[in-house]
Amino acid sequence: MFAPKERNMKIHVLAMAVVVVLGFYLKLNLTEWCFITLTIALVIGSELFNTAIETIVDMVSPEKNPKAKLAKDISAAAVLAFSIGAAIIGMIIFIPKLPL
């Protein structure tokens, strides 16, 4: 069974759980669920790709190497970009539904 070991993956899985619970509480419609599901899949998928890239880079280049660091930084930046996009989509969907 999949058990997230990476700290950032644990954060993303926790955020996903909060979003799903909030989605049920606020009674999201089908279209909103589709966007939420897609953004969750993109963030979790990008985090998995990032972990794979970092693992491969560590295997191929165990010593310090500026190009290895660059590859790891770029893959982490991709996760950040997807996470920011997901947060924006979440705000667009959830903020109007919140009882303020």
Image (cartoon, helix red, strand yellow):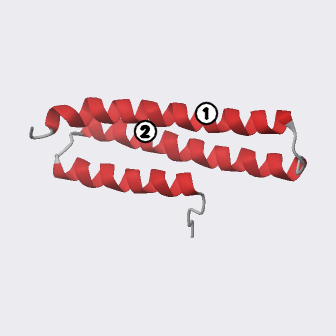
The quarter holding residue 21 reads: bottom left
Marking on residue 77: 1
* Helix, strand or loop under label 2: helix
| Left or right, 70 with reference to 76 | right
| Mark 1 burial class by Cα count in 10 Å: few <14, some 14-19, many 20+ | few
The percent position of residue 27, horizontal first and vertical second, equals 17, 46
Name the residue furthest bottom: 1
Residue 38 has which mark?
A: 2
Disc 1/disc 2 C-alpha distance (Å): 19 Å
Q: Earlier in the sequence, mark 1 or mark 2?
A: 2
Residue at figure coordinates x 21%, y 42% from the top left: 28
- Looking at the rendered structure, the number of numbered marks drawn on it comes to 2
Quarter of the figure that contains the N terminus = bottom right
Could you tell me which residue is drawn at 54 percent across and 35 percent down? 80
Question: Is disc 2 surrounded by few (<14), some (14 to 19) or many (20+) residues within 10 Å?
Answer: few
| Residue 94 point in image, percent of width and height | 23, 37
Image location of residue 40, percent across then percent down: 43, 44
Report the mark closest to the observer, 1 or 2: 1
Can you name the residue that lies furthest to the left here?
99
* Secondary element at tag 1: helix
- Residue 86 placement: quadrant: top left
- Measured from the top left, where is residue 81 in percent x and y? 53, 30
Q: Which mark is residue 69?
A: none
Q: Which residue occupies the foreground of this view, 11 or 39?
A: 11
Residue at the spot x=35%, y=35% of the render? Answer: 35
